[in-house]
Amino acid sequence: MNLEDQLRGDQSGAGSARLSERLQVEEQESAPLLEETRRLSGVSDPYGPLKTHVQRAVIPKLGPWLFSNQESPDLRREVDESVARELDASGTPLAAVDRERLIEEITADILGYGPLERFLADDTVTEVMVNGFDRIFVEREGKIEPTDASFVDDDHLQRIIDKIVSRVGRRVDERSPMVDARLPDGSRVNAIIPPLSLGGPTLTIRKFARDPYTIENLIDFGSLTPKAAHFLQSCVEGKLNVLISGGTGTGKTTLLNALSASIPNDERIITIEDAAELQLQQGHVIRLESRPSNIEGEGEVRIRELVRNALRMRPDRIVVGEVRGAETLDMLQAMNTGHEGSLTTIHANSPRDALNRLETLVLMSGLEMPLHAIREQISSALDLVVHISRLVDGSRRISQVTEVLGMESEVITLQDVFLARPVSDRASAQSSPSFLRPLECTGLQPHFQHKLAGHGVILSEDFYQPKLHAVPANGSSR
Ligand SMILES: Nc1ncnc2c1ncn2[C@@H]1O[C@H](COP(=O)(O)OP(=O)(O)O)[C@@H](O)[C@H]1O
Ligand SMILES: [Mg+2]
């Protein structure tokens, strides 16, 4: 179907018919950008390339002013004028009505997020996924659902991506087709475009939770039991080194944030992240964030450098958002050299897998170190692995709370302190859609009790008896 058929078939009626006539008239004049428009006759917005051209000219000219004056009443007027100037400078012949409409649409793209706007404003949406200009999905309560929202075409989507990443001084194009950025509210954005993404520009937005979940919220969701929560809080208070493991989106960062609330207020905490998500409420928090390299490939600061730097900042605790590279070794060394009570997360399928991943990450850091020594490091650094699973119904559940014991010949031994066992009989499987029973003590006494006691945290011996759901009154004292 060519552009004209498409315009005739378009339901928006008069405006499009006029546009179609104009395109015919202008065929002889054929300004270069309209040439491009005709070439891309499969595209549903004939002015797409022109809009992209104008937006790309306007944003760098307004520069930082655009992003530091988001609330300014002059913002719209300023952008409007700038768009009009660039549009006229492009030399494209336009009827007055089309010119007005184009200015309005380009300004809206520069100031807003097009069809994504309503999902960004909607607090029940936790993730926005754009698989293609007309395929937009959102996540609500852990479930992915399709939406009827749509961009006009690939160009339109690309313009919104451009606008988002221009805020961090980046640009997506064939030279750098993958970009991470952030919205002003802190939401995390990833964009990837052709040729890497085969189905057109793709955008994923992990929305920033304005009010991060507290441990009480997680209990209400059924992610863990009050008793397990009390135990984990005691472990954080008692300065154990804790690793939270789980798949993507299982709630590792959320749990890390909720548990960090148990760090006493008088301790100096340094948080290190790729994209600052943690929201600690303590008075003495220093937040560090890594930096990707710029377009020229310079200026990168990795998590590893930040961890090393943090050690020189007299931290009581180091909280690393996620270990996924060379920083793993530094983190383990920090844990082993008196920075107790450090917390981090890792992408893994089970506590055992988490340890294997740590091993791989240490090996990847290029250090020549025998496997045995690496395992020694890991087992003496870590006290506890907390594993989260995402179940078929979308719920997130802590399924294992596992103590890291020492080495036994070549293997690190683990012992579960809390376990959520699978539902075994059919009747309860039907009443409990998640197929996992609540977390329960396994009855095994953790070996780190003396370490906890050293920090004034004492849990009574019968705390670890299975089937005792109530939190004992004499649970913890400091
Ligand atoms: N226990 C939970 N129950 C329901 N939703 C949760 C829970 N924990 C986290 N979430 C939601 O899941 C999404 C991913 O959480 P996040 O902590 O960023 O995951 P991860 O760090 O494992 O990738 C967020 O939108 C968060 O609000
Ligand atoms: Mg995370």
Image (cartoon, rainbow, N blue to C red):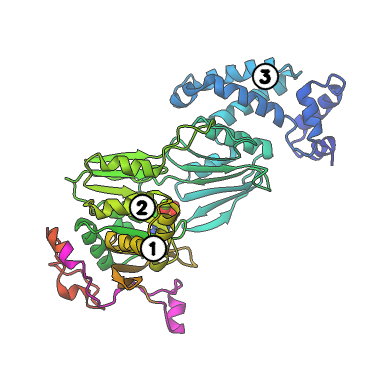
Residue situated in front as seen by the camera: 44 or 400: 400
Q: Is residue 355 left or right of residue 20?
A: left
In percent of width and height, residue 91 lies at 73, 16
Residue situated in front as seen by the camera: 474 or 106: 474
Q: Which residues are magenta?
A: 422-451
Q: What amino acid type is highlighted by mark number 1?
A: Leu
User: Crowding near pointer 2: few (<14 within 10 Å), some, many (20+)?
Assistant: many
Q: Is mark 2 within 8 Å of ligand 2?
A: no
Residue drawn 42% across and 42% down? 275
Residue situated in front as seen by the camera: 418 or 97: 418
Q: Is residue 102 left or right of residue 13?
A: left
Whichever of callouts 3 and 2 sits on the residue coming sooner in the sequence is: 3
Quickly name the residue at label 3. 87
Give the answer, above or below, for where 52 lies relative to 188.
Answer: above
User: Crowding near pointer 1: few (<14 within 10 Å), some, many (20+)?
Assistant: some
Which image quarter holds the C terminus?
A: bottom left
Q: Main secondary structure of the magenta part?
A: loop
Residue drawn 37% across and 55% down? 345
Give SS at disc 1: helix
Name the image quarter holding residue 145.
bottom right
Quickly name the residue at label 2. 329
